[in-house]
Image: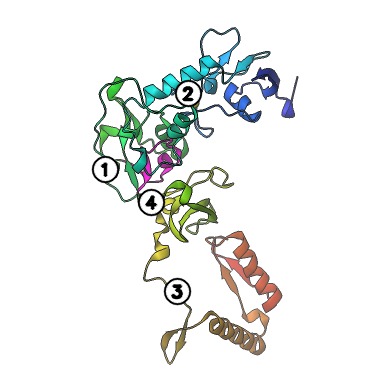
Amino acid sequence: MKGVMGVELIKLIIDGKEVEAPAGSTVLQAAENAGINIPRLCYDPELSKLGACRLCVVEIEGNRLLPASCVTPVMQGMVVNTESPAVIEARRTILELTIANHPLDCMTCDKMGDCKLAEYAYRYGVKESPFEGEKHDYVIDDSNPFIIRDLNKCILCGACVRACEEMTGADNLSYLNRGFHRKATTAADVPYIDSDCVFCGQCVAVCPTGALTEKTMSGLARRWDIDRVRTTCPFCGTGCNFDLAVKDKKVIGVLSNPDSPVNGRSLCVKGRFGWDYIYNENRLTTPLIKKNGKFEHASWDEAYDLIALKFNEIKDKYGPDSFAALSSARCTNEENFLVQKFSRAVMGTNNVDHCART
Ligand code: FES
């Protein structure tokens, strides 16, 4: 059977539910589209598939293994069980292995409330690991102003490595060593500040644990205390969207959002980490009006009254076309719309231009 755009549709059964999925999609994607949530640590819809963590295992009739659903393509007539006793047992064991060398300092971890590892440990009732052994004692990389890197909490999902290569194109991260000593790190394992990192923070955005966190937000709020306020980045004309992380009416950081239509979770260093100018004490907080050759603080009403007065004087004396408005690519579409609307409807001129026109 063919679906939209002629793509072949595959019929399968997931948890007793008849499901249709485009050929080439994975069992995890088919389940997700059917409203069935399969846990995942290394899978990220915006990154290439790695199949590393194995937490997404499912039972498939006729297959005596438990394949990872994020890398298993759908097949006609497949019968899948995503929460069978064998699957649950396997996921518990995987989580126990994953936390075997984890610091488990969740009570003071900044990622608490947004940590996938904690979320799934809770879902499957995993409190501790029966596997005893060595723990890592990596020095926390606190060398830069933006990102805290605590590899003791890294679960080697590889999301940061893939995001750096596939989303940013910086290719600053890779894997080092084998076995217990394997780590996702920079070339020559140098701190971020000494590496080729461009500090876009995509690695932080995709990290499912507290291994990579925003330094500016450290210790300031639990994730559930943060209000997310969607806004448009003011730094360039691309118009990326992101969420301001707001605690007690104060901006404490920026969190990217996959729903952002322009940029998804991708941001540059300015967009993600350059927000602190908001509270710079040198910022103007009131309009200034020049009186007797000196700028003096004024109220918004005073400023608007003066602007209206001067604009009207100029228009009356020299005509509407003596006025021109020059807008900016750094403004939002809505702001630019208002500038042209004001020029045409209020000032009566089509003299509107834009710094990015040429
Ligand atoms: Fe499928 Fe990690 S989510 S293997």
The earlier-in-sequence mark between 2 and 3 is 2
Local secondary structure at mark 2: loop
Q: Which mark is residue 194?
A: 1
* Residue positioned 54% across, 82% down in the render: 303
333 left or right of 286 in image? right
* Neighbours of disc 4 within 10 Å: few (<14), some (14-19), many (20+): some
Q: Which mark is residue 55?
A: 2
Residue 292 appears in the picture as rendered: yes
- Point out the stretch of residues depicted in magenta: 196-216
Image location (x, y in percent) of residue 194 = 26, 43
What's the distance in space between the residues labelled 4 and 2, CA to CA? Answer: 29 Å
Q: Residue at x 51, y 10 (%)?
A: 65
How far apart are labels 4 and 1 at the CA level? Answer: 22 Å
Whether disc 2's CB lies below 8 Å from ligand 1 is answered: yes
Give the side of residue 258 with respect to residue 172, left or right: right
- Identify which residue, 31 or 312, lies in the foreground: 31
Label 3 secondary element: loop
Q: In the rendered image, which residue does mark 4 sit on?
A: 217
Label 3 is placed on what type of residue?
A: Thr
- The kind of residue on which mark 2 rests is Leu
Q: How is the image coloured?
A: rainbow
Residue mark closest to the camera, 2 vs 1: 2
Residue 350 visible at all? no
Q: In the depicted view, which residue is nearer to us: 155 or 2?
A: 155
Disc 3 designates what residue?
Answer: 285
